[in-house]
Amino acid sequence: MHFSTRILLLASAFAFTVPALADNATPVKIGVILPMTGPSASTGREIDAAIKLYMAQKGDKAGGRKIEIVLKDDTGVADITKRLAQELVVNDKVSVIAGFGLTPLALAAAPIATQAKVPEVVMAAGTATITEASPYIVRTSFTLPQNTVPIADWALKNGVKKVVTLVSDYGPGIDAEKAFSERIKAGGGQVLDNLRAPLRNPEFAPFLQKAKDLKPDALFLFVPSGFGAQLMKQVAERDFAKEGVKVIGTGDVTDDEQLQGMGDAVLGMVTSMDYSVAHKSPENKAFVEAFMKANPAMRPNFMAVGGYDGMALIYGALEKTKGDTDGAKLVDAMKGMSWVSPRGPISIDPETRDIVQNVYIRKVEKVDGQLYNVEFETMPNVKDPVKAAKKAK
Amino acid sequence: MSDTPLQADRDKAFAFLKAQARWRWPEIALWAFAFASILLMPSRALLINEIAILALFALSLDLILGYAGIVSLGHGAFFGVGAYTAGLLAKAGAGAAPLSDPTLGLLAAGATAAMIGYATSFLVLRGNDLTKLMVTLGIALIFQELANKFSDITGGADGLQGVTPAKVLGLFDFDIYGKTAAFYSVTVLFLLFCAARVIVHSPFGISLRAIKGNALRARAIGVPVDARLRAIYTLAAAYAGVAGALLAQTTAQVSLDVLEFHRSADTLLIVVLGGVGTLYGAVVGAAAFKMMYDFISSYTQQYWQFWLGLILVVLVLFVRGGIMGLIARLTGQEERA
């Protein structure tokens, strides 16, 4: 704190003498709102660690101005997110709000972004429609349909004709179910059943038994980050491989943060996702090494990389505007930006402000005694299919 | 001749009850401060708004817990029903009166919650405390799942967006600084608090305390126990509904979270922290809880729950009667039980 007051004093001293420099001497504040406690705390921890890592690596200056982070815990509750966003904008005078662990949290802050003309960088939430809630929202995580459609394509290519889906019964789960089922049907496949398990205290056994009895070629799974271990334990007990049923899903199920604890039962599971800690690139190698060095007990996951790229986006935009923090100018600068992230080449679609990225098909394998999602196929530059379909209409 | 001592006793009892119902200067000071705080600390208007809403919700729980002895872990159901009612109304009106009028929203939310409160009171009032805990918890879970399932209406897990309340009384627009919101919520809290204060000091309220003390004896002296309990449960549900409506209107959105278990649990904690059966305990407890949260979490975003938990445990263990009990003891106004 005392450090920033000193800078403030310095800034006000400048304000009297050299007005032209005054603006550049004040720090740019970024308000980060994350669930640091509660059921989604792991999301918050991963993103917070990634933001700190980014600033440790690239320094605390962008576009000639000092960057200051104001971190707030919303406990995953939407009305608190909204109040924090409002307070950050009104009291702390932040130039950007960022974070947002879950869809309702990102949506809660959207009216504030619009009203105050402050860019909202979504680093985690994945429902497709989020970016439509405000012209100031830019996303660096992923959309659920974006990650779901590629695994459907892969399944069709690999002789899967009949499928059963099992998802968590809430917005993003239904997003995934719809995206997968529609793609399978469009490719001439057959959807035998769409099963939905409750989000809270899920007991997957009866659903899995039903899925097994239907004898599909593949079983598609989606549960939010953090619920994968529980699901996969029960999947393992049913031994789907023996019946010739392929178990596939989005990478949320085999979340890198939890994967190690799931045991050998997940070996061979094929998923699609925008990031794996095992992604082979020099950028990712450096990222993972630095991340694990700073946080020895943690493996970076897709949330961490979303936060890391969110910072890259904000830094990049500030460089482009030369430190100008006008919201509309920042969002304009963000549109169309492209760079090489630890997950591979990514860019911001100038039309939808959503991320365009490679989606990888991965298989769980054991490397050096540890479980990893090893990538073996790449679907390059995938746009969000929901918004692409809307545009086509 | 024989009724003179009885008459004296009656006068004494009346005088005692009247003295209890009288406004004292610290109360007036508290409310004056509540309103002044919005002007004194405009940057904290949003937090004050949140405190007022939480205080109203806690007040509604204190009405049934502190005055009628009904324990509930599912009070959040009424809060949520109120929030969705007001949210849907404001959305339907698209920001224009009459449908989006905030006052109408409050009334509708209160009425809906009261209806559901009355309907479920028959279930809740059967059985003992443990059964009540389970039944209230169950009812709250049912509403939560309903809100999740009917996502066409409620927006499901994405939350209800596009909640646009009209100007308060047709005069004051909700601003980004939260000033209108804070004044609005504190005013509603104040009005409903005054009503609650009148109610608990009325013969009706006193009969409730008799029931809480000993339901069997209360019945023996002719108090219609079940009817009274149903009445206060319905009233408390309406209060909770209004609190939910305030949240929906001032944050301009409703998420599934309004029906989550932690709201009911937090509120129970606030009432215990503030002091059960004091009305002011709910207000003071809510303010203390939110300010502690705000203060501690600005220093440690990840571990604030630990410190808050520690403080609460210490308070509950060593400060009997909550904050209000502590104040009473410090000012030497402790009532002898």
Image (cartoon, coloured by chain):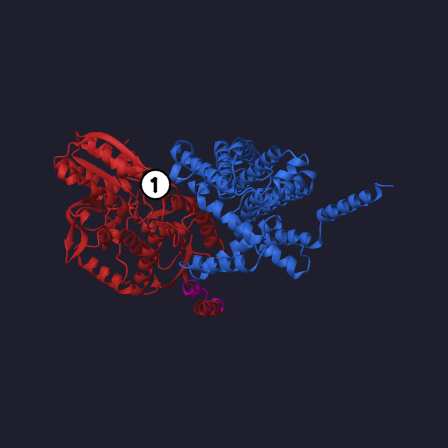
Chain colours: A red, B blue
Q: Quadrant of residue B148?
A: top left
Tally the marks: 1
- Which segment did they paint magenta? A14-25
Structural crowding at the residue carrying mark 1, measured as other residues with C-alpha within 10 Å and reported as few (<14), some (14–19) or many (≥20): some
Q: Outermost residue, right direction?
A: B1
Q: Nearer the viewer, residue A307 or A314?
A: A307
SS of the residue under disc 1: loop
Residue A301: x, y in percent?
Answer: 26, 53
Q: In percent of the image, x 52 and y 48: which residue is there?
A: B268
Residue A65: x, y in percent?
Answer: 37, 63
Is A249 left or right of B139, judged from the image as shown? Answer: left
Residue A252: x, y in percent?
Answer: 26, 46
Residue B324 shown in magenta: no
Q: Nearer the viewer, residue A119 or A301?
A: A301
Is A3 left or right of A341, judged from the image as shown? Answer: right
Q: Nearer the viewer, residue A201 or A329?
A: A201
Indicate the quadrant containing the N terminus of chain A: top left, top right, bottom left or bottom right: bottom left
Indicate the quadrant containing the C terminus of chain A: top left, top right, bottom left or bottom right: top left
Query: Is residue B176 visible to us here?
Result: no
Mark 1 — on which chain does it sit?
A
Residue type indicated by callout 1: Leu
The residue beneath circle 1 is: A199
Is B283 left or right of A234, judged from the image as shown? Answer: right
- Above or below, B98 against A248 in this view is above
Residue B304: x, y in percent?
Answer: 44, 59
- Above or below, B316 against A273 in this view is below
